[in-house]
Image (cartoon, grey):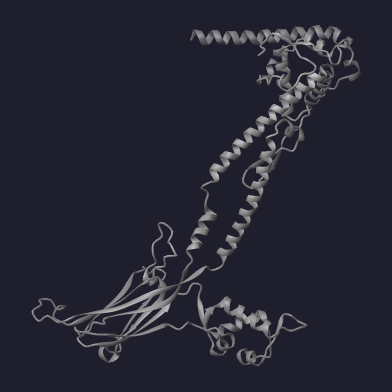
């Protein structure tokens, strides 16, 4: 590996023969001596001759050229094309030259194409999931209702007043029947019994408990605390007939249809959107839409009886439905509270159809909000970025050395012209190109003064550095 000694640069140099030089600061550029410039740009040098050049000179020249190239100046080379993806920077080998230098890049291109297809598939799936989450995702389950009662007979020898009076206690509880095919997500608790209902009313025998004490009511409020059951305790030593009215808490709300509309559509209780959809299906099936004005519906005899008009706009249907939608019927259960100690049937079970959230909905939401792999993907993208940049820099080095080996004289001349133009643009210096291209221009008296000033500035700079170093050592 060459150091500071001179070595010849062969005209037929290949990639393996060209060393990749480490970067060095631009301040090393003055190492390019007059002899190097004359050897590279002199008129007596053959285009494919092999001048003897120092490694330091080549390294300084390369570093200066690469710094100019990085800042967008006139050194030309093929770069890698960056493609901005939605999640990270993805790099594409757009140059055929790079593919020739790195044959393995085709495998990367294949993986990149596959990743784009995979990203598109995942994105389409995410959109489908987002659309699905906008619609209610319900699942029908069985809620088993347990109604039981206990009787506490009177105790004559009891000290307190509660024990000396016979009483009964009614309990209303329930739970969802387990479905082995449905597994709750980890950490998700089962729903409380009261969360399925909007209200619960227990109507006792009015003759036994009077008009003011025969109703037991529970209604949901925004501050309601959910519970696993309800219990009612009353004094009494005779069997009591009671009626339980349970109003389910439908989400989204459901409505009972007017009997005429229910018979026409075949729907008893349903959500507003489903009712409107069924109406539209009836209109299409019976061809009630006006053929000239699609906005209007020509009512048949059933619609005329229900909406009381021969013709109406479809946009008016939601408003007209308001008077035809009623609250849903409550679940009515008749139960006998038995105080007979020999009665074994003190517990009754009823199964109610309820709608619960689909467990898949929480998994879909978790999938959309999941960022578990984003950090790993970002790390891999950064590694890809660094690798591509490394290949980019190596190609710049190879192009520089290869161009210089093929035509040292022409390359140096073109480079000097390019840097001269850039220097004038950056410093706003206006010169005379015709005079500057002749050697006599640089033998005028001003050149000697410029050289003296340059060396004087360098000596002063080194002196200051030496004084600072001595001052630090003395302290």
In the image: residue 59, left or right of residue 138: right
Q: Which quadrant of the rendered structure holds the N terminus?
A: top right
In the image: residue 242, left or right of residue 38: left
Q: Residue furthest toward the left?
A: 157
Identify which residue is drawn at 60% across, 40% down.
Answer: 381
The spot of residue 194 in percent (x, y) is 37, 72
Identify which residue is drawn at 68% across, 21% down.
Answer: 20
Identify which residue is drawn at 67% across, 12% down.
Answer: 2
How many badges with numbers are in the image?
0
When the figure is inspected, residue 306 is found, relative to residue 35, above or below; the finding is below
In the image: residue 55, left or right of residue 276: right
| Among the 4 quarters of the image, the one containing residue 421 | top right
| Among the 4 quarters of the image, the one containing residue 396 | top right
In the image: residue 152, left or right of residue 291: left
When the figure is inspected, residue 240 is found, relative to residue 391, above or below; the finding is below
Between 93 and 417, the one lying in front of the other is 93
| Among the 4 quarters of the image, the one containing residue 178 | bottom left
The spot of residue 137 in percent (x, y) is 52, 68
The spot of residue 365 in percent (x, y) is 52, 58
Between 268 and 324, the one lying in front of the other is 268
Identify which residue is drawn at 73% across, 16% down.
Answer: 58
The spot of residue 106 in percent (x, y) is 70, 38
């Amino acid at each position: 590996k060459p150091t500071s000694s001179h070595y010849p640069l062969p005209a037929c140099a290949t990639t393996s023969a060209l060393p990749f030089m480490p970067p060095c600061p631009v301040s090393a550029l003055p190492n390019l001596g007059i002899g190097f410039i004359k050897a590279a740009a002199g008129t007596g040098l053959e285009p494919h001759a092999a001048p003897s050049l120092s490694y330091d000179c080549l390294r300084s020249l390369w570093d200066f050229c690469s710094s100019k190239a990085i800042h967008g100046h006139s050194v030309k080379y093929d770069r890698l094309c960056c493609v901005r993806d939605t999640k990270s920077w993805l790099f594409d080998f757009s140059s055929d030259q790079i593919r020739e230098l790195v044959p393995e890049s085709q495998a990367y291109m294949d993986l990149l194409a596959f990743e784009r297809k995979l990203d598109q598939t995942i994105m389409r799936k995410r959109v489908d999931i987002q659309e699905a989450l906008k619609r209610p995702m319900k699942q029908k389950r069985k809620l088993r209702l347990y109604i039981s009662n206990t009787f506490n007979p009177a105790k004559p020898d009891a000290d307190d007043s509660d024990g000396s009076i016979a009483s009964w206690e009614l309990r209303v509880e329930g739970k969802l029947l387990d479905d082995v095919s449905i597994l709750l997500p980890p950490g998700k608790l089962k729903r409380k019994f009261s969360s399925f209902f909007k209200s619960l009313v227990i109507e006792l025998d009015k003759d036994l408990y009077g008009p003011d004490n025969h109703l037991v009511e529970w209604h949901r409020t925004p501050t309601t605390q959910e519970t696993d059951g309800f219990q009612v305790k009353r004094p009494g030593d005779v069997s009591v007939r009671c009626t339980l009215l349970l109003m389910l808490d439908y989400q989204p709300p459901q409505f009972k249809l007017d009997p005429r509309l229910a018979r026409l559509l075949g729907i008893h209780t349903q959500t507003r959107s489903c009712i409107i959809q069924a109406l539209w299906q009836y209109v299409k099936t019976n061809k009630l839409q006006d053929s000239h004005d699609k906005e209007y519906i020509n009512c048949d005899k059933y619609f005329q009886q229900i909406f009381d008009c021969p013709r109406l706009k479809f946009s008016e249907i939601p408003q007209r439905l308001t008077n035809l939608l009623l609250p849903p019927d409550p679940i009515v259960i008749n139960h006998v509270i038995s105080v007979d100690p020999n009665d074994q049937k003190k517990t009754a079970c009823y199964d109610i159809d309820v709608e619960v959230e689909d467990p898949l909905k929480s998994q879909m939401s978790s999938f959309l909000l999941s960022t578990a792999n984003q950090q790993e993907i970002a790390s891999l993208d950064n590694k890809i970025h660094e690798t591509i940049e490394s290949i980019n820099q190596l190609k710049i080095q190879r192009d520089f050395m290869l161009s210089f080996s093929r035509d040292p004289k022409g390359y140096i001349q073109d480079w000097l012209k390019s840097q001269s133009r850039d220097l004038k643009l950056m410093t706003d210096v206006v010169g005379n190109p015709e005079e500057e291209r002749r050697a006599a221009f640089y033998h005028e008296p001003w050149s000697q003064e410029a050289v003296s000033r340059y060396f004087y500035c360098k000596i002063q700079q080194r002196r200051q550095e030496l004084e600072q170093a001595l001052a630090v050592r003395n302290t």
